[in-house]
Amino acid sequence: MSGIAEVARRAGVSKATASRALTGHGYVAPDTRARVEQAAHELGYVASSSASSLVTGRTHTVALVVPRVGRWYFGEIIEGIERSLMQLGYDLTLYVAEPDSRDRDRLYRHFLARKRFDGVIAVALEPDDSDLERLVGFAKPTVCIGNELPGVVTLGIDNVAIGRMITQHLLALGHTRIAFLGATPNDDPPARDVDDRESGYVQAMRAANLEPTVHAAALTITDGYAAATPVLADTDSRPTAIVGACDEVAIGAIIAAQRLGIAVPSQLSVIGVDGHDYAEMFALTTVEQDPCNQGERAVAMLMSMIDGAPVVGRTTAPARMVMRASTTTPAPTPA
């Protein structure tokens, strides 16, 4: 395999110039860069990341820590991060470790401690998570997606405001019997984003002098369906509207309603949060937060930090209400 010397010789430049042209570190005139890249292509030269790291002190690798990959939200974030890093010539090392698991402890004590990366992106860390202190202790540029975290650069949506907004939407339609579906089950690890959406719902209900009604469910379609079924089957206490902690829970509630013969939206309005791929299929009114774009933005923020630019505090990601056919005014009460 050809080396950098052969590439430089064919392009008619020094080895240092060839290296700058291929790594992107340092200025090279556009025509010279094109000549070096053409020479590298003709010779089949592939830049060595280890050799580059000796010169630049960088590994061109980013560590990504997520609690799970089987849910739509995390998959979308991973896709956005991976796509952005590939365009920048960076490798991605993915670490999957659920909260309170032994794998998560090993991740911080062994794998991340080796520091074979230029920066870290962590998703869905909790503000009181002991892992946060360990992550900061690595002294590497770090961006977190999700909850606002003290002393750490974060990117996320305002979950309290969103929970309040979607509840107010149902209140404005005339609903008074509105239930929140998807509160964190007692035996599950804490989930601040869900708690904040629930808090926004409770604020809106109490501001309207209404009693909040909260039901626990894990954030999946199947768990949303299982939790919604007994709630909707009780004709005496059945709500006329459901605020889903996420779109998957909301979709589970729609499926439960359909199986119980409850028409959506004429007998039950349902609203969610996320912008899930299935939302359009179920005509779900939701707040889209575009986690794929959040992954891309997190990479841009991290690259700025790696390059020495100051990036501090929290950045609020955009979110927008998308109106579909799952919400409407409540049916008239029988005389």
Image (spheres, rainbow, N blue to C red):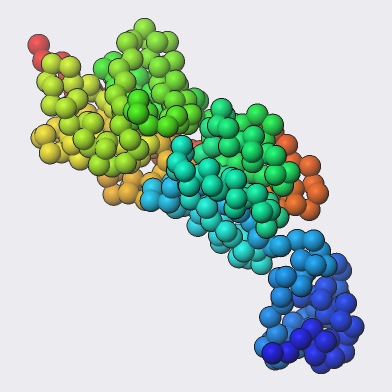
- Give the x, y percent position of residue 143: 64, 44
Q: Residue at x 21, y 35 (%)?
A: 226
Q: Position of residue 239 (x, y in %)?
A: 22, 21
Whether 94 is drawn above or below 330: the answer is below
In this rendering, is residue 143 above or below 181?
below
In the image: residue 143, left or right of residue 232: right
Q: Residue at x 83, y 87 (%)?
A: 5
The x and y percentages for residue 138 are: 70, 44
Quarter of the figure with residue 23: bottom right
Q: Report the number of discs.
A: 0
Quarter location, residue 243: top left
Residue 290, placed above or below residue 328: below
* Residue at image coords 18%, 36%: 256
Viewer-proximal residue among 160 and 47? 47
Residue at point 48%, 50% (across, down): 96
Task: Say which of 194 and 104 sits in front.
Answer: 104
Residue 270 visible (yes or no): yes
Q: Quarter-wise, where is residue 13 in the image?
A: bottom right
Q: Quadrant of the N terminus?
A: bottom right
- Residue 292, visible in the rendered structure: no
Question: Farthest residue in the right direction?
Answer: 14
Q: Is residue 231 left or right of residue 320?
A: left
Q: Is residue 270 left or right of residue 231?
A: right
